[in-house]
Image: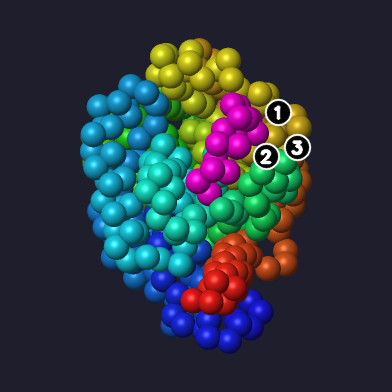
Amino acid sequence: MSAPPPGENRPLTIMLVCGEPSGDELGAELMSGLRALAGDRVKIVGVGGSAMKAQGLKSLFPLDATAVMGLREVVPRIPEILRRVRIASDFARATRPDALVCIDSPDFTHRIAQRLHRLNSGIATVNYVAPQVWASRQYRARKMARYFDLVLALLPFEAKFFEQHGLRAEFVGHPVVERASKIVGGDTLRSRLAIPPAAPLLVVLPGSRANEVRALLQIFRETVAVLAKSVTDLYCVLPAVAHVAEAVRSGTENWPTPLHVVESEADKFASFAAADAALAASGTVTTELALAGVPMAVGYKLGWLTYRLVRPFVRVPYITLVNLLLGYEAVPEFIQDRCRPDLLAACLERLLLDTEYRSKQKEDLYKAASLLGQGGEVPSHRAARALLDFIQSSRATAANQRLSSGR
């Protein structure tokens, strides 16, 4: 970061707010980047989960009510979500941070930025991990420009898209890239869990939201039951985030193969290092699997009403980032009515037993990982640098305005 203007080197307060585990991980990485660049000059407050708490955040409240998706799941929790929006926005107004950074979870985090805008708070607002409005309902980008001052974009084409809609944006790279170094310990995990070195290992990832687990866990269970008939000695590992771990454990009793449910981030990444294939819900985890080079099948299913309302607005052919980057379906997607055990099992059987088919997807995953920006400054540091420069610029502008007005 360039040198601050005179008188503007006072400590910074940055408020970070996320609403679900994937955003929590991004927030923790951003916190690490901010401290690496600004050290003790920065104080971080806001809302986060276990990863951000491990970085020292004292969260205003847990993520249990906000980590939901889909009309059927969101509607019953609207009163509690709105209450937490008020708590977070009132906290921002009371503490006057140099910037509010909304991380992912637009149904929750954007409402905080919107409320601060309506109340004319004067607090600078930043969106880190913008919703994929380029994929559907593109008019939302212009709406976002009313209550956000900056977007930290994860994908190269996003910055240009938002700029065209009147919203300042900067490409910082996809934070998932820097997690590649964490994908280690596969042999150790197999040994600790008594999984034979040569046994086929499937990592099962039914999502980090409670509604995803409800929609997908039974389908994935039935998929494994079908797959185990053709793949002998199959083992499964299921990484679960804390707030859905209990539901996962109760839903995986009498699993059709030997199964290990793991909860730590280290074990999750070790399971990726150990896995031969993955069965995953759509989301950030598919990009992590791509970096790990783990061939996968992606399944996803929304509530029927949510799907019928959303489908007409979707403007992209794929839901998996790997496929969007490459422009073709490198990772097989099984969405809605095609999210069936027989189809998923057939695909996974090929990934586990067909060497040529498996190798082709692994090559595609490598290409996609390269497009995400591997090499150079890590994305969380680029995001932290862009955020600090933005704050510095905002401070300088405010100082100049005070001088011009004689205040």
Q: Which residues, given as a range, are shown in magenta?
A: 133-148
Q: Amino acid at mark 1?
A: Glu
Quote the CA–CA distance across marks 1 and 3.
Answer: 8 Å
Are circles 1 and 3 on residues that touch, CB within 8 Å? no
Mark 2, Cα crowd under 10 Å, few <14 / some 14-19 / many 20+, is some
Q: Which mark is residue 329?
A: 1
Q: Image quarter for residue 352?
A: top right
Between 8 and 374, the one lying in front of the other is 8
User: In screen coordinates, is 277 left or right of 188?
Assistant: right
Quick check: is 146 in the magenta stretch?
yes
Q: How many marks?
A: 3
Q: Amino acid at mark 3?
A: Leu
Mark 1, Cα crowd under 10 Å, few <14 / some 14-19 / many 20+, is some
Quadrant where the N terminus sits is bottom right
Secondary structure category for the residue under label 1: loop
Q: Nearer the viewer, mark 1 or mark 2?
A: 2
Secondary structure category for the residue under label 2: loop
Quick check: is 202 in the magenta stretch?
no
**Residue 298 at x, y percent in the picture:** 55, 30
**Residue 77 at x, y percent in the picture:** 26, 32
Q: Residue at x 32, y 66 (%)?
A: 95
Q: Which mark is residue 165?
A: 2
Q: Which residue is mark 3?
A: 326
Q: Residue at x 55, y 36 (%)?
A: 143
Which comes before the other along the chain, label 2 or label 3? Answer: 2
Are circles 1 and 2 on residues that touch, CB within 8 Å? no
**Residue 162 at x, y percent in the picture:** 66, 43
Mark 3, Cα crowd under 10 Å, few <14 / some 14-19 / many 20+, is some
User: In screen coordinates, is 205 left or right of 400?
Assistant: left
Q: Image quarter for residue 251?
A: top left
Secondary structure category for the residue under label 3: helix
